[in-house]
Image: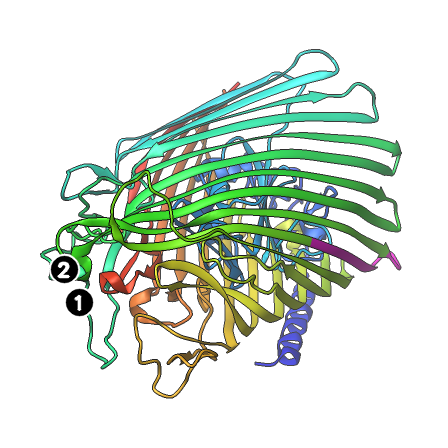
């Protein structure tokens, strides 16, 4: 499929939707929140105001592909992390691996979870960029809304947003007194609690405090020790102070803290993957030595897995209205991230390679914005700076039984060090109203980054294991600068009332980096040229919303993850081509019945990529990589975490009952096969699957809310991610699984 044909198809769709602009049969109600009806007697699909372009505007008025989910909808679905919203956003894939969020939008994301790795999808909370993907899983409570922007965000957002941006906006302090509490009890001893309180301390000062506790027992067991695995025990708190000393000056000070300590994020055994040079299959070493397959949700490890995480941060958000339509904003923030995961690369009954993975990060960022909002211009001019220090390691002793020796541990493997990043950028974007119906957007950003690394790696077969000993190799030091100019040009036109078409070109940039702990050279930056056309329409007097987007990406120098020796490393794949179509449709056929369809078709393929696979040393028989090693030509293979098709269906009906209202909601999500590596091997993938969820909510007139829920009704075992482990262990496939069937009851009350 060519880009011209894609463009033609999308424009035809726009014309069809314009012709479908039918007579009204209800009253538009754009003030309701959460993306669904909140009261009886009102009709029409709700609207959500977003700040995706650094100013408040309706999600339907933004000429970019953006999905927004309001706090009411999140609360009803019991969303406690980003994985809960993945199915509702076309093109978004969210999985968790070793405590880190793997975010992928339209096939672009992070394909490596080694220490120091960075995502191509930017994660922001209240405007603050979070460089560590692990922290993205710890921020989901007291949320006003979530915004997901698809496509490069090079002219308005922080760093490394070649794939898009996920923005979480929390509820701000209010001068009126508000409060609420939510308690959930369910299977797997699930006991979760959330609470918030907001009030005015004076007519110029307001405060808000919110907290969350999450607890559940394990979804699996360690069959050697009997302990739970994949449980969760976390605590979080957030406080905000709002000062409004004058009508023009607003100061918001916020701080948050998160702590988690449990046995989650452990590797599970999925099966064998290795082959000898002669092409014969290899049985994983643990099975040869008497181990056993514990099942997809269990492990068999001599020591219990462990996961410890601590994230905290603070921000100062200061806005001053210079004039009625000109605002200056300063956003200063500091983020701290510290986590350690203790797992086992051989979770099948024989103690061969216990592994520890840890990372500590300190990040300071400063952003300045000047916002002009007039009838003809929507202008944002800004500057951004970030400094970050990352200390990370992967280490573990090796049992010589793995290589045919005695039952004795040697010092084994170490990879780690420090990575420092300084990043700066200046940017501007203006949307100019040529006429009342035609607007032109021009944007540009210049980014500069410097990375410095001091790292080392070692595999020590000579010395007996002593945790006090460090690596023997000398520290490798290097640094490199990266810079890029990323423009954007776009046009949008109102072809009818509440029906807009748009087209844009933008360029995305993700800086190069170092494989921390590999003592190797820097990787080249990722670059993407993105073309997009789309339609946004609200029809039938607010009872039908239809948003369609078509896109084409020319993606070069991809940073692709692979296992190399004992390291998880990135390498620059040559190029990829990505194109597809996404649709978001919401219909209210009768009062208080909301039907939704979110679907995507994605063609994300490597154009050029030749690489070796250490688990299959013969290669494809004729191809060799740049070092002359037998390799595979992966041109035409799908990018990891990029299913060809996904479709999310939902239906929700609300009706009056004595003392309140009852809402019934059902969801069904289907995904095509998801490959976890660029080699596109079925044993390194999740086959096509579908998952259903159901919710019943009773709201009383006094503010009490009771929600019964059941998720993953069919109790499907779904692989979230996977990788082939080192050849020292016979190349077993290890990975992570999504939760099983869960059900329970939530009781919530708002003051």
Q: Quarter of the image holding residue 558?
A: bottom right
Asked if one can make out residue 373 in the rendered structure from this viewpoint, the answer is yes
The chief SS type of the magenta part is strand
Name the spot of residue 125 as percent of width and height, x first: 59, 39
Which secondary structure, mark 2? helix
The residue under the point 40% across, 62% down is: 671
The residue under the point 17% across, 61% down is: 285
Q: Which residue is mark 1?
A: 283
Q: Which mark is residue 287?
A: 2
Packing grade of label 2 (10 A; few <14, some 14-19, many >=20) is: some
Q: Nearer the viewer, residue 322 or 302?
A: 302
Render colour scheme: rainbow
- What is the C-alpha distance between the residues marked 2 and 1? 7 Å
Does 615 sit left or right of 143 as displayed? left
Per the rendered image, the range of residues in magenta is 433-448
Verify CB contact (< 8 Å) between mark 2 and mark 1: yes
């Amino acid at each position: 499929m060519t880009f011209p044909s894609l463009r033609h198809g999308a424009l035809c769709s726009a014309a069809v939707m314009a012709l479908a602009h039918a007579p009204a049969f209800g009253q538009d109600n754009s003030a309701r929140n959460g993306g669904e009806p909140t009261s009886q007697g009102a009709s029409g699909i709700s609207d959500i105001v977003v700040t995706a372009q650094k100013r408040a505007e309706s999600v339907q008025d933004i000429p970019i592909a953006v999905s927004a989910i309001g706090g009411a909808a999140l609360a009803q679905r019991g969303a406690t992390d980003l994985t809960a919203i993945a199915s509702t956003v076309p093109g978004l894939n969210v999985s968790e691996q070793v405590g880190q969020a793997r975010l992928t939008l339209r096939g672009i994301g992070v394909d490596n979870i080694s220490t120091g790795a960075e995502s191509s999808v930017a994660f922001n909370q209240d405007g603050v960029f979070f460089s560590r993907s692990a922290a993205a899983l710890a921020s989901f409570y007291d949320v006003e809304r979530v915004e997901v922007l698809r496509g490069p965000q090079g002219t308005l957002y922080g760093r490394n947003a070649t794939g898009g941006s996920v923005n979480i906006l929390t509820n701000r302090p209010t001068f009126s007194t508000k409060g609420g509490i939510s308690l959930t009890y369910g299977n797997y001893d699930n006991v979760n609690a959330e609470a918030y309180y907001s009030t005015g301390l004076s007519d110029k000062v307001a405060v808000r405090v919110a907290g969350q506790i999450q607890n559940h027992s394990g979804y699996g067991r360690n069959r050697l020790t009997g302990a739970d695995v994949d449980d969760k025990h976390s605590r979080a708190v957030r406080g905000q102070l709002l000062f409004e000393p004058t009508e023009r000056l607003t100061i918001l000070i916020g701080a948050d803290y998160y702590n988690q300590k449990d046995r989650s994020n452990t590797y599970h055994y999925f099966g064998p993957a290795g082959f000898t040079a002669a092409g014969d299959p290899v049985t994983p070493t643990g099975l040869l030595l008497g181990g056993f397959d514990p099942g997809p949700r269990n492990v068999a490890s001599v020591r219990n897995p462990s996961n410890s995480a601590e994230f905290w941060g603070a921000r100062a958000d200061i806005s001053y209205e210079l004039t009625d339509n000109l605002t200056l904003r300063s956003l200063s923030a500091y983020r701290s991230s510290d986590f350690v995961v203790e797992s086992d690369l051989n979770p099948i009954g024989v103690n061969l390679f216990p592994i520890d993975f840890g990372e500590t990060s300190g990040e300071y960022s400063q952003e300045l914005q000047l916002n002009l909002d007039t009838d003809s211009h929507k202008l944002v001019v800004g500057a951004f700076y970030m400094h970050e220090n990352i200390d990370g390691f992967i280490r573990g002793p090796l049992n010589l039984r793995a290589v045919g020796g005695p039952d004795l541990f040697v010092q084994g493997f170490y990879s780690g060090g420090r990575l420092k990043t300084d990043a700066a950028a200046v940017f501007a974007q203006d949307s100019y109203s040529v006429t009342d119906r035609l607007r032109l957007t021009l944007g540009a950003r210049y980014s500069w980054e410097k990375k410095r690394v001091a790292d080392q790696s070692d595999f020590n077969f000579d010395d007996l294991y002593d945790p006090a000993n460090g690596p023997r190799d000398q520290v490798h030091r290097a640094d490199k600068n990266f810079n890029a100019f990323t423009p954007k040009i776009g046009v949008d036109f109102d072809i009818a009332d509440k029906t807009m078409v748009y087209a844009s070109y933008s360029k995305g940039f993700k800086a190069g980096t170092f494989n921390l702990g590999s003592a190797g050279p820097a990787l080249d930056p990722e670059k993407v040229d993105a073309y997009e056309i789309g339609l946004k329409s609200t029809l039938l007097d607010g009872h039908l919303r239809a948003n369609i987007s078509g896109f084409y990406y020319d993606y070069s120098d991809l940073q692709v993850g692979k296992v190399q020796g004992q390291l998880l490393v990135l390498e620059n794949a040559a190029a990829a081509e990505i194109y597809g179509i996404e649709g978001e449709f919401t219909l209210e056929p009768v009062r208080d019945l909301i039907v939704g369809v979110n679907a995507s078709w994605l063609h994300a393929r490597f154009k050029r990529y030749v690489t070796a696979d250490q688990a299959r040393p013969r290669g494809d028989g004729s191809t060799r990589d740049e070092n002359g090693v037998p390799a595979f030509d992966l041109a035409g293979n799908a990018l990891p975490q990029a299913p060809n098709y996904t479709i999310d269906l939902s239906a929700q009906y609300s009706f009056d009952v004595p003392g309140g209202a009852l809402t019934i909601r059902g969801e069904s999500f289907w995904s095509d096969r998801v490959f976890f590596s660029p080699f596109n091997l079925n044993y390194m993938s999740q086959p096509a699957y579908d998952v259903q969820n159901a919710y019943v909510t009773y709201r009383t007139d006094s503010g009490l809310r009771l929600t019964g829920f059941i998720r993953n009704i069919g109790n499907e075992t779904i692989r979230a991610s996977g990788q082939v482990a080192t050849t020292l262990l016979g190349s077993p496939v290890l990975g992570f699984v999504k939760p099983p069937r869960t059900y329970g009851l939530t009781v919530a009350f708002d003051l």
